[in-house]
Image: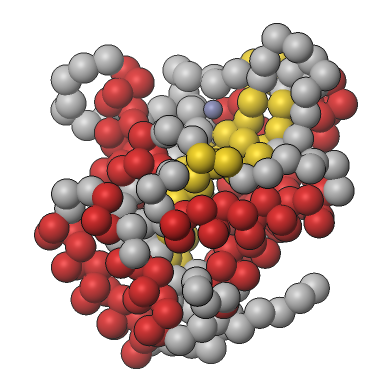
Amino acid sequence: MRVVFVSSPALIKTIRISCVALVLLGALFFAGIFTANSRAVTSTGLPLSGITVVIDPGHGGYDPGVTRDNIEEKNVVLGISYALRDYLQTGGARVVMTRESDRDLLVLPTAGPKKKQDMKHRLFIIHSASPDLVVSIHANAISAPRWRGAQVFYNADCETGKRLAELIQTELANVLKNTDRQAKPGNYLILNEAGVPAVLVESGFLSNPAERELLSDEEYQSQLAWAVYLGITRFLNTPSS
Ligand SMILES: [Zn+2]
């Protein structure tokens, strides 16, 4: 196990504010600055002390995501998210999950289609948490069964999000040893409106039989989460320039 120590509060603050211009969240922005300052004082010495991460397990409840051979994306991504939460909390991070069970997020009195309501509530949770970074976990499926491999997406307009995505992608390649995919820009609402560095991890293809079997396995889910955790720690400990 590699132990990485957290960077200075100044760096944390730099990471926090670098993507804020992407959204019109003035009030939350100032709330976030004050939170960052208070974190510096309450540091406990753990590697991720003072860091808040939102984990967004995709789909849930009425929405299973992609499904193959009775394996549902919503369950696979929740398993990975549990493992990631545990690694991050052990490292001292505060973790907020958009869901912790098989549920959707249709609870806000918001008009509009179900998917839109669900996504609005996810963004509400993200903004309320005032996080340092956001990780959304998903799984893929397409018609051709041969494609496989985990891949990380980022908002093309967010340099820090890109750096986070590339570091996680590198660790996925190192740990899993079964993907040579590269981190890639992606146009996703969660990434565009998070307001902080955010990545979407497509953990693999349920349409590939071998990868589907891996993604259903708790140990593999844990390895995947470990790779994401390592990428996050490298991101927080590496200067951006
Ligand atoms: Zn998905």
* Residue 174 percent across, percent down from the top left: 81, 56
Above or below, comparing residue 34 to residue 121 in the picture: below
When asked about the image quadrant of residue 4, the answer is bottom right
Which residue sits at x=22%, y=32%?
108
Above or below, comparing residue 209 to residue 195 in the picture: above
Q: Quadrant of ligand 1?
A: top right
Which residue sits at x=44%, y=57%?
159
Tally of numbered discs:
0
**Residue closest to the far left:** 27
When asked about the image quadrant of residue 26, the answer is bottom left
Judging depth in this view, the residue of 2 and 96 nearest the camera is: 2
Is residue 127 visible to the viewer in this orientation of the structure?
A: no
Q: Is residue 145 left or right of residue 86?
A: right
Q: Is residue 6 left or right of residue 171?
A: left
* Residue 175 percent across, percent down from the top left: 81, 55
When asked about the image quadrant of residue 207, the answer is top right
* Residue 52 percent across, percent down from the top left: 42, 65
Is residue 28 visible to the viewer in this orientation of the structure?
A: yes
How are the colours assigned in the image? Answer: secondary structure
Which residue sits at x=41%, y=28%?
104
**Residue closest to the far top:** 143
Quadrant position of the N terminus in the picture:
bottom right
Q: Is residue 139 left or right of residue 36?
A: right
Above or below, comparing residue 7 to residue 94 in the picture: below
* Residue 202 percent across, percent down from the top left: 62, 36
